[in-house]
Amino acid sequence: MSQITLIGERLADVGTEFVYGGESSACEGCPYRGQCLNLVEGRRYRVTGERDSGTLECAVHDTGVTAVEVEPAPVLANVPANAAYAGSKAELAGSCPYTECPSHEYCEPAGVEFDEERQITEVVGDPPHDFCMLDRDLKLVEFAAEEDA
């Protein structure tokens, strides 16, 4: 379900995904707090619509904020191959120090915590790396978007 929020002007394009980071100390005293701070911290969102609201000044975003419609977004992630079944739940395999690896963003995806079980909607296939430096047998999956409560 879509929700209206204010985000930085630079992020306000349909299709842009972001992980909501929560309140900044610069938000204190802002008259738009209620419209900005209405998402779930740590959750991944996708901009699904732009509103013709103009731009409001913001102490966090240098070019100001504007109103958009957002929805929780699914997350691509690498999980242990033996747990990679559409419809099942799985966790990430664990942290990985190999940040240059083409799979790193899927082994440690923004918007998913380690030890957090998530529903798999689709098994996408093999991860983008040729081999895992940690010798893990992984599959690339899509975790379902977490709906706001």
Image: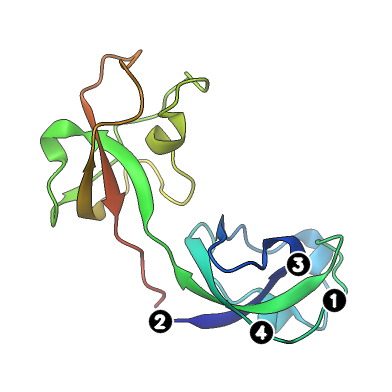
Q: CA distance from mark 1 to mark 2?
A: 29 Å
Q: Residue at x 26, y 45 (%)?
A: 141
- Of residues 149 and 10, the one nearer the viewer is 10
State the CA–CA distance, disc 3 to disc 4: 12 Å
Marks 2 and 3 sit apart, C-alpha to C-alpha, by 22 Å
How far separated are the C-alphas under marks 1 and 4?
24 Å
Of the residues shown, which amino acid type is indicated by label 4?
Arg
Q: Which residue is mark 2?
A: 1
Give the residue at mark 3: 9
Q: Which quadrant of the figure contains the N terminus?
A: bottom left
Q: Could you tell which of marks 1 and 2 lies nearer the N-terminus?
A: 2
Q: Which is more N-terminal, label 4 or label 1?
A: 1
Give the residue type at disc 2: Met
Q: Element under label 2?
A: loop
Residue 61 shown left or right of residue 110 in the figure? right
| Residue topped by disc 1 | 29
How would you rate the neighbour count of disc 3 (Cα within 10 Å): few for under 14, some for 14-19, many for 20 or more?
A: some
Question: How far from the left and from the top, in percent, is residue 98?
Answer: 47, 18
Seen at 48% across and 60% down, the residue is: 43
- The residue pinned by badge 4 equals 51
Q: Nearer the viewer's eye, disc 3 or disc 1?
A: 3
